[in-house]
Image: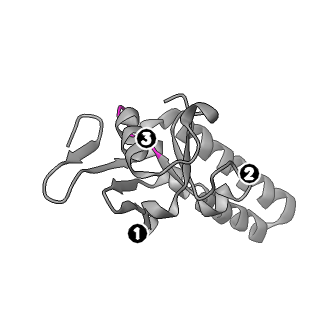
Amino acid sequence: MAENGSQLDDGGNGKTISWRVHPIVERPGQGVLLIGIIIICTWAFWKGFGQFFGILSLVVLVLSMAPFFLPTSYRLDEDGIEITSLFFIRHFRPWSGFRNFYTHNVGVHLSTFIKPSRLDAFRGSFIRFAPGNRRQVIAFLNEHIKRTRRPEETDDKA
């Protein structure tokens, strides 16, 4: 495993990249702030609307922020991408299901559409970079996702 948490395996049937991210460990300051916000919101709902809504707000906020609190593993290979997250749930998507991707500061959004769409959040997949593996992941995606638009036509600066 590399220093940055990503692992490149070139043996056998082709290249594979795998890594794991755990945002709360990587950014503990944001984690403390987020936990504080959850506590304040829970207390406000408890005081304002009663015990049931206080507990409900706690559950909803913690579950919605689970990807920040829990680690997520990514594996990119010749066939597609596998994402292992909450409670070891695995999602596999083949490269043929993606038509474009858009880079961000902390990750890359894989899109099922040629152009940006409002449905991207529901049909696409967002993968976070490990510290130091941004270029490696983008190069891998350029090889495997058949983009119909050139990177200079999008916001990609990679």
- Badge 3 crowding class, 10 Å Cα cut-off, few under 14, some 14 to 19, many 20 or more, is many
Q: Is residue 50 left or right of residue 73?
A: right
Q: Are marks 1 and 3 in contact (CB under 8 Å)?
A: no
**Crowding at label 1, few (<14), some or many (≥20) Cα neighbours within 10 Å?**
few
Read off the residue under disc 1: 90
Q: Nearer the viewer, residue 115 or 91?
A: 115
Residue highlighted by disc 3: 129
14 sits to left or right of 31: left
| Residue at image location 68% in from the left, 44% down from the top | 37
Tell which circle, 2 or 1, labels the residue nearer the N-terminal end: 2
Q: Which residues are the magenta region?
A: 128-132
SS for tag 2? helix
Say which of 43 and 20 sits in front: 20
Colour mapping: one colour
What's the distance in space between the residues labelled 1 and 3, CA to CA? 18 Å
> Is 90 located above or below residue 9 in the figure?
below
Please tell me whether mark 1 sits on a helix, a strand or a loop.
Answer: strand
Residue 142's quadrant in the figure? top left
Q: Earlier in the sequence, mark 2 or mark 3?
A: 2
Cα distance in 3D space between marks 2 and 3: 30 Å
| Residue 8 coordinates in the image, percent (x, y) | 23, 45
Instruction: Reply yes or no: does residue 130 show up in magenta.
Output: yes
Q: Which residue is mark 2?
A: 41
What x and y, as percent, mark residue 138?
42, 39
Type of amino acid at the residue the image marks with label 1: Arg
Q: Is residue 119 magenta?
A: no
